[in-house]
Structure formats: structure tokens, C-alpha cells
Image (tube, rainbow, N blue to C red):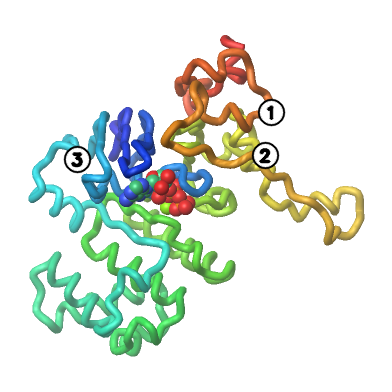
């Protein structure tokens, strides 16, 4: 089946007074129709740049796409006209951000803002637009939608604001929703509710989702497949079940090992210790102005082989749903 979105060997650079940084290096990934793909990795690894490049929202300069293609419904989004891109942004691909307050205008009521979005996408009279707004808020399980429409964004809680954003993002019936850390600012209970709403709507309407997160728990909870990024490269890609059962890349193994595990302490029948230490991956994320040669993870890797600081490992398919880019784990080179 042809994927809904296919990113191929996408490279992006940013140039500032310190030099040019290679922020994305030949990133390739696909999203199938109706699928929820998680994009995970530490801060600064290029998740948001990937999302913004899909929507052509990278400021140029300082940014520059140096190679690649982004296929979406038979077009390459990197080469279509600005006019066409505006249509894609409004109608076919929607995005929601981490902090809804930065996307909502504080001086207009929620109703005003939602109505404007609705009327931008659909030719509706005011009363019809109002009914649609109420219906959309119902769909994101907002209690008392009519009351919410009369409120200003600051009068809502963080979780309610994020529901408003989801409702607005889905008004145009997009084929793809990009959610960039949509629940990071919310407490765990509200995060769970918002994720459940997002997943239900995506399943009901067969909308694909690119879920950007640094939280492996979120990936486990809602994603079908996951791509793990490290310092601007995709290092592993698999279905969620496969990735958690059989992580191959040492970086992915480190990410999974650093998830707090409530069960561990119960294996030996003892109460959880307050002083239990969590695993953390040694070292820090490299600068992308002069990234480490070869595998960008090799300075932090505990299993470094002889080719790792010289040759860039290519993403290789180990099985039909599992790809990894690691010399040591692929056997051949170390
Ligand atoms: N407008 C910009 N100008 C210069 N550099 C940028 C710009 N936007 C992003 N970068 C750089 O690109 C790299 C990747 O940033 P990006 O925002 O994609 O990270 P991220 O994976 O989304 O991190 P986080 O989890 O913190 O959101 C970083 O090194 C960042 O400094
Ligand atoms: Mg980001």
C-alpha cells in the first residue's frame, strides 16, 4: 500500500554566526493512512524541524533544505507552489503545538476563533458555523461546549485549551495531523484524557497522526509504529510492540531503560525504594555544527565498534517491520 506521507532522504541545515549545523541528515520515514507514527528522541534531535519542514514552515534563511523529497498524495511538498502549500496546510495537514496558549489569540473568545477557522474551510452561514463548533467541542468531549465558546482562552484550563486546539485542527477533515508534544504541558491524568480523545478521533475518521514526543510512555500508549531519532538521523524504526520487545539500537535500548518501571521493585516482593536510581544514557547530545563523524551516537555508545567513528551506518531492514542503523548490531562492520 502506498504510504500517505513519505519523507525521503531529507536533509536540513541551519546557518548562523557560529557556522552551519546539519540538523536533519537524510531522514527517511513513512506514514500509512490511518496510522499513528511516533517520532521520539532527546531534545534538539530534529523532531520539530522535521514537522515544520513537512509544512514548509522552516525560516529560510537561516534554514535550508539541502536534499530530499516529501511525497504526499502524489505531490512533492518541497516543490509545489506556495499557493498549493497554503491549501495543504489549511485543509490536508493540520498541526497542533505543545502550548495551546501560543496558538490561541488571547483577545478573542474561543467561539470567535473557532468560527473563523470553520468559515475559512467551509462555506457556512453563521448559525451553521456555530452548530458545527458546538458539535466539534462535543467530539473532543468538552463539557458544556456553548459555555466554552463564550470564554476567552485564559479562562480555560490547559487540558481544555488543548481540546479546543484538537477540535480546530480537525475542522478541515485533514488527512494528516501533526501533533508536536501536544500533552507535555499537561498533568498525567489530563494527558491521558487528551491522548485518548486524539486516538479515538484518529481511528474513527481514519486520520494519520505524526505524534512527536520525547516520552516513550506516550509512544507505548497510543502509537502503531515509531521512528527513533538521534542527532538529526533516524536510527531505528519498528512497530511499537516490536520496538519495546526487541529494541536493537543501543540508543533505543537506553531510552527504554530510562523509563521508570514500577514493577521492578515488586519482583523480589519489596516495596519500591525511594532511592532507586534510574538508568540515564551517558554523555550529552552532540553539537550539530561539527557532529561526530560516522555514527553520531558513537561517543556515547557502550558498544562502539571499529567502523563506528568512520562510516555512517545506513538504516537497514532487519525484518519487514524493523529497521536499524547500527554497525555493531547489524554485525557486518565491527
Ligand atoms: N530557527 C532556527 N534557527 C537555528 N537553529 C534552529 C532553528 N530551529 C531549530 N534549530 C536547531 O535545530 C535543531 C533541532 O531542533 P528541533 O526544534 O527540531 O528539536 P526537537 O527534537 O524538536 O527538540 P525538543 O524536544 O526540545 O522540542 C536544534 O539544534 C536547534 O537548535
Ligand atoms: Mg520540538
Query: Of callouts 1 and 2, which one flags the residue occurring earlier in the amino acid sequence?
Result: 2
Q: Nearer the viewer, mark 1 or mark 3?
A: 1
Mark number displayed over residue 21: none
Viewer-nearest residue: 180 or 267: 180
Q: Which residue is mark 2?
A: 282
Q: Residue furthest front?
A: 17
114 relative to 155, above or below? above
Give the distance between the C-alpha atoms of the residues marked 1 and 2, in whole angstroms: 9 Å
* SS assignment at label 2: loop
Q: Which residue is mark 3?
A: 77
Judge left or right: residue 313 versus residue 26.
right
Q: Residue at the location (51% across, 44% down)?
A: 41
Residue 332, percent from left and from top = 57, 10
Q: Which residue is mark 1?
A: 302
Query: Of callouts 2 and 3, which one flags the residue occurring earlier in the amino acid sequence?
Result: 3
Q: Circle 3: is it few (<14), some (14-19), or many (20+) Cα within 10 Å? A: many
250 relative to 270, above or below? above
Residue 190, percent from left and from top = 53, 71
37 relative to 292, above or below? below
Amino acid at each position: 500500500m502506498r504510504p500517505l506521507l513519505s519523507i525521503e532522504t531529507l536533509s536540513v541545515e541551519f546557518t548562523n554566526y557560529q557556522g552551519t549545523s546539519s540538523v536533519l541528515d537524510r531522514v527517511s520515514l513513512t506514514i500509512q493512512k490511518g496510522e499513528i507514527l511516533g517520532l521520539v528522541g532527546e531534545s534538539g534531535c530534529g523532531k520539530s524541524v522535521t514537522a515544520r519542514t513537512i509544512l514548509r514552515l522552516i525560516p529560510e534563511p537561516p534554514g535550508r533544505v539541502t536534499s530530499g523529497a516529501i511525497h504526499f498524495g502524489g505531490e512533492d511538498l518541497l516543490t509545489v507552489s506556495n499557493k498549493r502549500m497554503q491549501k495543504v496546510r489549511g485543509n490536508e495537514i493540520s498541526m497542533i503545538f505543545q502550548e495551546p496558549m501560543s496558538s490561541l489569540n488571547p483577545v478573542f473568545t474561543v467561539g470567535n476563533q473557532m468560527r473563523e477557522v470553520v468559515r475559512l474551510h467551509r462555506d457556512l452561514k453563521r448559525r451553521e458555523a456555530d452548530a458545527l463548533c458546538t458539535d466539534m467541542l462535543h467530539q473532543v468531549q468538552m463539557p458544556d461546549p456553548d459555555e466554552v465558546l463564550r470564554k476567552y482562552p485564559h479562562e480555560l484550563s490547559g487540558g481544555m485549551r488543548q481540546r479546543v486546539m484538537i477540535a480546530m485542527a480537525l475542522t478541515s477533515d485533514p488527512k494528516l495531523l501533526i501533533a508536536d508534544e501536544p500533552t507535555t504541558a499537561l498533568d498525567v491524568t489530563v494527558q491521558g484524557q487528551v491522548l485518548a480523545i486524539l486516538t479515538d478521533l484518529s481511528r474513527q475518521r481514519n486520520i494519520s497522526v505524526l505524534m512527536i514526543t520525547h516520552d516513550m510512555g506516550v509512544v507505548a500508549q497510543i502509537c502503531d509504529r515509531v521512528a527513533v531519532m538521534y542527532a538529526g538521523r533516524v536510527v531505528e524504526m519498528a512497530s511499537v510492540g516490536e520496538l519495546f520487545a526487541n529494541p536493537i539500537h543501543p540508543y533505543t535500548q537506553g531510552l527504554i531503560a530510562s523509563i521508570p518501571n514500577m514493577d521492578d521493585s515488586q519482583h523480589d516482593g519489596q516495596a519500591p525504594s525511594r532511592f532507586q536510581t534510574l538508568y540515564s544514557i551517558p554523555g550529552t547530545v552532540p553539537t550539530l555544527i561539527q557532529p561526530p563523524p560516522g555514527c553520531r551516537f558513537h561517543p556515547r555508545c557502550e558498544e562502539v565498534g571499529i567502523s563506528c567513528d568512520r562510516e555512517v551506518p545506513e538504516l537497514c531492514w532487519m525484518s519487514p517491520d524493523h529497521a536499524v542503523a547500527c554497525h555493531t548490531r547489524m554485525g557486518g562492520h565491527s
